[in-house]
Amino acid sequence: MKQVVLLGSTGSIGTSTIKVAKDLPDRIRLIGLAAGRNVDLLRDQANQLQPTMIGMADSSSIDQLRQGLEPEIETVFGQDGLIQLATLPEADIVLIAIVGIAGLEPALAAIRAGKDIAVASKEILVMAGELVMQEAARYGVRVLAVDSEHSAIFQCLEDKPESSVRSLWLTASGGPFRMLDKEAFDAITLEQALQHPSWVMGRKITIDSATMFNKGLEMIEARWLFNIGMDRVKVIVHPQSVVHSLVEFCDGSMIAQLSTPDMCLPIQYALTYPDRVSSDRVQTDLATIGSLTFQAPDEDRFPALKLARQAGLTCGTMPAVLNAANEVAVEAFCDRLVAFNDIWRMVSEVMGVHEVVPHPTLEQILAADQWARHCATDWVTQHGRSN
Ligand code: NDP
């Protein structure tokens, strides 16, 4: 039985994790839950699952949360609350599925308290991959991937040393604009960008998939998770989203992990690792799928890939800057203040003026994050549509 704390329980990954926990009541017990603003759903989840402690992003919703909540469930709030949850003494593993930066400090706190972490929030490894992996090694805990691509690579690698790997190949669906002409990119609307062809996900990651910043963030995530040079992390477009990623070994052999797309599978693998546990959720009928196709990504139409490779090669605070500028840009696009192509333009300009701090501390990473947010917000003020 694994005692699991789930940060981000009301989101897309969070609700899938609850499905997995309900499928495997003898294996997984959710002892802590945290959400941002969705009070009603968090209360329902808590009353059903009976965790020890639950948390909300801020204190203003705590009174509302407590109305109708089982009285023995403790409530906490804010970053301190997330850290309390992440370090609950009885927790074995903390699954972090919060969008953005809020999961970083709780992740480090969990590691330092000797807990394994399962990482959905790619921002954690993008911003602070070096630090997180160093701390995990120091405290002897595992960092398990929840992202389907990284889970696939983890399953293919099977503890083979980095020296036996030629390249890691992350597959990308290509998003809704895989076939769109470059000239049409500036006219892309929010509604079009929110239509992902194969995955149903939260809003931020859906836009990131459309720009391919999601794949860029995943490249940096893979670099740290598997301790491999950025030049050996590659991307291949695979529109069917059945091959979740591949490892090319030094002898030329390629091993892939396949299944129909369902996040419950990588979530379950992370929470039951090292066991593989039976589940009827995913059935993959290759004959019905028929064909699997692959194509090289077009970095000219999707400059996010180039920018992410550049950030991953530069390291230091640059990936945190890319991540923060992209977050501001996506928000501005969702608020209809900037065009689709402005997302990568903003990120590129902010990265261009950043003075990199090598091997940064947590404080330096957070400072770079704040700096990039200010810089990107200024960009929106100067070039955004409201002006
Ligand atoms: P969602 O937007 O669906 O969910 C985000 C969750 O985080 C919600 O539960 C939200 O609560 C919670 N949250 C936000 N801020 C806080 C906070 N300050 N404190 C506590 N909880 C907070 O996102 P996804 O589930 O799609 O994605 C989560 C992460 O997983 C992202 O980093 C994404 O990149 C990554 N990921 C997602 C995949 C997917 O298929 N969705 C696949 C692989 C990775 P509330 O709703 O109550 O505001």
Image (cartoon, rainbow, N blue to C red):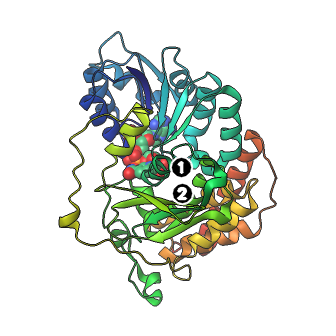
Q: Which amino acid does label 2 sit on?
A: Glu
**Looking at the rendering, in which quadrant would you find the C terminus?**
bottom right
Query: How many neighbours does mark 1 have within 10 angstroms: few (below 14), some (14-19), or many (20 or more)?
Result: many
- Name the residue tied to disc 1: 122
Give SS at disc 2. Answer: helix
Which residue does the image show at 36% across and 73% down from the upper left?
176
Where in the figure is residue 84, as x and y percent of width and height?
55, 21
Which residue does the image show at 64% across and 69% down from the upper left?
307
Q: Which of 5 and 219 is in front in this view?
A: 219
Mark 2 residue's CB less than 8 Å from ligand 1: no
Q: In this view, does 68 lie to the left or right of 186?
A: left
Mark 1 residue's CB less than 8 Å from ligand 1: yes
Q: How many marks?
A: 2
Q: Residue 218 carries which label?
A: 2
Mark closest to the chain's N terminus, 1 or 2: 1
Which residue does the image show at 29% across and 28% down from the upper left?
45
Q: Distance between the residues labelled 1 and 2?
A: 7 Å
Q: Which of 94 and 333 is in front in this view?
A: 94
Where in the figure is residue 216, as x and y percent of width and height?
56, 63
Of all residues shown, which one is farthest toward the left?
288
Image quarter of residue 60:
top left
Of all residues shown, which one is farthest toward the top?
72
Q: Decide: marks 1, 2 in contact (CB < 8 A)? A: yes
Image quarter of residue 173:
bottom left
Q: What residue type is labelled 1?
A: Lys
